[in-house]
Amino acid sequence: MATMNKLSPELRTFLQLYKWHEIDPIPWAAKTTPLSQSRVGLVVTACMTMADQTPFDAGRDENDASIRYIPSDTDPRTLVNTYPAQAFDHSGLQADPDLLVPINRLREMEYAGEIGELAPRVVSLCGHLPKPRALIEESAPDIARLFAGDRVDTVICVPA
């Protein structure tokens, strides 16, 4: 993540003046299945896509709250980051894609018995959503249905 002093004056001003969306109360579900027996879902918010998927459009006015599904057996090094903004330091992701799409780390945890198993699909979103209504009203319910259908017990969200 870039520090404020490295951002353009326009972006600094935007971040300082933006009216951030607050969720109260925060929705939460208690964990009922031990992690070592849980099917774990993964949500990443770095605009990651497979090479043959439509790129996210982080720059459009109404935001891009669309979803990309990535098979969990995908090698993270083959994924494409479609978020071009300067507020995101891409160098770490280029060096280690597992920083934002930790499929390999979760597989290691699965093999070690630390988690039950990784769900069959990873959910990828564009984390840059100044207007989150479409995410809240459309995308999030679709994601919840997907994870319910995949019998996911625990979800890890990796913010970008």
Image (spheres, rainbow, N blue to C red):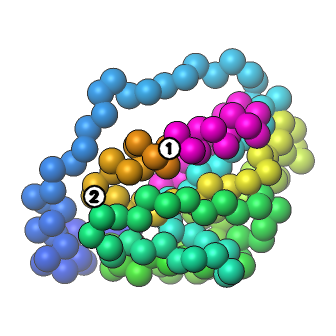
Give the secondary structure at mark 2.
loop
Q: Which mark is residue 140?
A: 1
| 143 inside magenta stretch | yes
Give the secondary structure at mark 1.
helix
Between residues 3 and 135, which one lies in front from this camera angle? 135
Residue 80: x %, y % from top left: 60, 79
Q: Residue flagged by tag 1: what amino acid is it?
A: Ala
The residue labelled by disc 2 is 130
Camera sees residue 94:
yes
Q: Quadrant of residue 104?
A: bottom right
Quarter of the image that includes the N terminus: bottom left
Q: Residue flagged by tag 2: what amino acid is it?
A: Pro
Between residues 141 and 92, which one lies in front from this camera angle? 141
Task: Identify which residue is drawn at 19% across, 80% down.
Answer: 8
Relative horizontal placement of residue 88, taking residue 121 as reference (left or right)? left
User: How many numbered tags mark residues here?
Assistant: 2
| 51 inside magenta stretch | no
Residue 67: x %, y % from top left: 55, 59
Q: Which mark is residue 69?
A: none
First to last magenta residue range? 141-160
**Above or below for 33 versus 67:** above
Residue 132: x %, y % from top left: 33, 51
Q: Residues within 10 Å of mark 2 (few under 14, many from 20)?
A: few
